[in-house]
Image: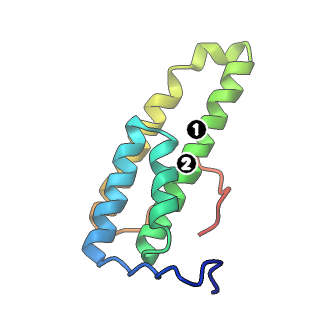
Amino acid sequence: MTDSNPYATPQEPLSPELERLWAIVVHAFGIVFEFFAPLLGYLLLKDRGPFIRHHVTESLNFGITMVLFYVVLAITIIGWAFFWLPPIVWVVFRIIAAYKASIGEFYRYPVSIRFIKN
């Protein structure tokens, strides 16, 4: 794995406890900052360990899926009647994901399109 910047220092892997903590944070902040928290987590933490990489990738894929779902609802006439649905879905699934991360499990969102692979 070559880096385009030869002077950059490689990031140290996180301890398992910190990986779990950051996975919980990314999922929890995803409730309020739906797309931006997972994107920031992915950009900053994806190379810090396999557990955190899995969780930030899953969180980002879920965020992208929810944004696309909202766009589809916005452009369809019948979709306006279901505009209340995505917030409920993302709060419930993000709470489940944060809980699974807290107990050290790898979690996959069941309604997520895998745009970015682990």
Residue at position x 68%, y 56% from top? 115
> Taking 104 as reference, is 4 above or below it?
below
Residue at position x 52%, y 51% from top? 39
Residue at position x 33%, y 70% from top? 19
Inspect this view and state whether residue 9 appears. yes
Front in this rendered view, residue 5 or 100: 5
| Apparent side of residue 28 relative to residue 69 in the rendered image (left or right) | left
- x%, y% of residue 100? 34, 60
> Taking 8 as reference, is 26 above or below it?
above
- x%, y% of residue 50? 46, 76
- x%, y% of residue 99? 30, 55
Label 1: state its secondary structure: helix
| Label disc, if present, on residue 66 of the rendered structure | 1
Inspect this view and state whether residue 108 appears. no
Mark 2 = which residue?
62
Q: Amino acid at mark 1?
A: Met
Front in this rendered view, residue 89 or 49: 49
> Taking 34 as reference, is 47 above or below it?
below
| Apparent side of residue 78 relative to residue 82 in the rendered image (left or right) | right
**In the picture, residue 117 is in which quadrant?**
bottom right
**In the picture, residue 41 is in which quadrant?**
bottom left
Residue at position x 51%, y 60% from top? 42
